[in-house]
Amino acid sequence: MGGIGSGTGIRPNRKRTKQFVETFPCIDTSAFPFSSMRLLPKACQLSIQGVTFQIYPDKLLILQGNSPEALLYEIFFSLTPAHYGNHRYWLKCPKCSQRKRKLSLIRMDGFPLFLCRCCLNLVYKSQNRTQGDQIIHKKWALIQKLGWSNECIPDEAKPKGMHWSTFIGIRNEIAFLHDEAFRFAPFKNV
Ligand SMILES: [Zn+2]
């Protein structure tokens, strides 16, 4: 990783190689409504995609097979207040510990691992569809950063106090994004 936005403007791995989150099975917090979680029988067991869970009010235990001794790891719930005295359940990603609505399942050497899409480096299909718009937005954000009004950036546009290497990096990036935007949205005003 590293290097992105480091000032050179060179980002060799430009091709979209990310996978779509929709293609991975996932567990969703909507499966754990607060009202029914309170009524949960002790250590309720559930199997999703061949993975066995034991559900507790505060966490999920991920088991290998059916025996309780075969605990692999835990996924903790986090609760935030919602409307009408309700609470919303979140799943805490076992890797980054951030609250998430969904965790996607991958298998590492047969080991079932539930992680958030950020940790898995996944994107939504819808995010990809509007890629042209995102590129245009990014380009204009950079142009504005230089206090300029179009993508043709002369040397005089370098803001005072900005390093030349930073400026050239941004300028290259703007030029790159401009070309990319045309590729994705040829009929739009980029
Ligand atoms: Zn994560």
Image (cartoon, grey):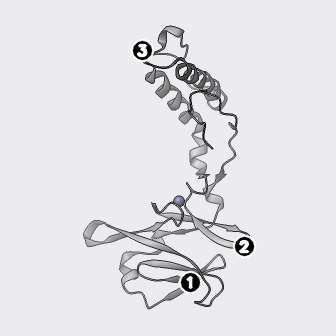
- Foreground label between 3 and 2: 3
Horizontal side, residue 85 vs residue 114: left or right: left
Horizontal side, residue 141 vs residue 68: left or right: left
Residue denoted by label 2:
110
Label 3 to label 2: alpha-carbon separation: 55 Å
Horizontal side, residue 62 vs residue 106: left or right: left
* Dot placed on the residue nearer the N-terminal end, 1 or 3: 1
- Image location (x, y in percent) of residue 101: 47, 63
Disc 2 C-beta below 8 A from ligand 1: no
Q: Residue at x 63, y 89 (%)?
A: 66
Is the residue marked by circle 1 packed among few (<14), some (14-19), or many (20+) residues within 10 Å?
Answer: some
Horizontal side, residue 180 vs residue 76: left or right: right
Check disc 3 and report its element: helix, strand or loop: loop
- The vertical placement of 79 against 67, above or below, is above
Check disc 2 and report its element: helix, strand or loop: loop
Check disc 1 and report its element: helix, strand or loop: strand
Q: Residue furthest right?
A: 109
- Image location (x, y in percent) of residue 31: 48, 74
- Image location (x, y in percent) of residue 163: 50, 19
User: Amino acid type of disc 2?
Assistant: Gly
- The vertical placement of 122 against 34, above or below, is above
Disc 3 C-beta below 8 A from ligand 1: no
Residue denoted by label 1:
46
Residue denoted by label 3:
160
Q: Quadrant of the N terminus?
A: top right
Q: Quadrant of the C terminus?
A: top right
Disc 1 C-beta below 8 A from ligand 1: no
User: Amino acid type of disc 3?
Assistant: Lys
- The vertical placement of 179 against 30, above or below, is above
